[in-house]
Image (cartoon, grey):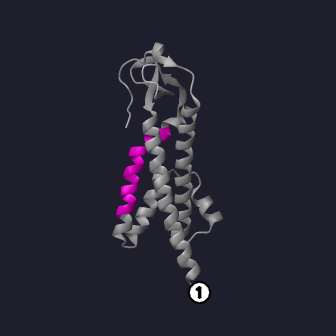
Amino acid sequence: MTSSPTKPFDTTDLDPVLTDADRLVMAETILAWADLDTGISRLIFLMFGIDSDAGSILIGNMDLKTKAERIKSLYSHLGNDAGAASFSKLSNAMREFSFSRNSIAHRKCIGRLKSEPSRLVFMSSRHVKGEQGSFEMIAIDRSEMIASAKFARDAAVTVANMINAIEAAGAASP
């Protein structure tokens, strides 16, 4: 995935006008990750046998990585190596695909590159170490955002299927 550039940003290459397609891909990325986050929270409630109110209070604003790690830990504790491996794989994939989501959610989108219009430019208030008056700038291709959203949507479907299976098993129990 994209990483921070090491060279100074050329402001003459910036088009500050975002298209509707730019906005749509950013929104879809955020919404897809929110779907995954909500699903994993619900899965935690079910797997740990906690009602929704208590579970919500317990996990509060816990980040998605920690939630997945907690499920992995429960699987390991229960001796379910396949489940633990599955959530380990999910955590690794989340690390790879979350860069776009995190940039959209935690940085200001200031436009797109004129030279590469599919690359959106994000700025943060984080300084560049050793360079006074310089802030991090990242250019992310829309294709990376689309891949991030697809990953999150696919993972959310898998989590929803797990939730459905647990709920169905619970409904079948006397």
- Relative to residue 174, is residue 11 depicted above or below? above
Q: Quadrant of residue 173?
A: bottom right
Q: Is residue 98 magenta?
A: yes
Q: Quadrant of residue 39?
A: bottom right
Magenta residues (range): 85-102
Expressed as whole percent of the image width and height from the top left, the position of residue 90 reads: 40, 55
Under mark 1, the amino acid is Pro
- Relative to residue 151, is residue 48 depicted above or below? below
Quadrant of the drawing holding the C terminus = bottom right
Within 10 Å of the Cα at label 1, are there few (<14), some (14-19), or many (20+) other Cα atoms? Answer: few
Can you identify the residue that label 1 sits on? 174
At x 57%, y 51%, the residue is 61
- Relative to residue 145, is residue 116 depicted above or below? above
Q: Residue furthest right?
A: 53
Taking depth in this image into account, of 67 and 101 the one nearest to the observer is 101
Expressed as whole percent of the image width and height from the top left, the position of residue 7 reads: 36, 19
Q: Is residue 168 magenta?
A: no
Residue 170 as seen in the image, left or right of residue 7? right
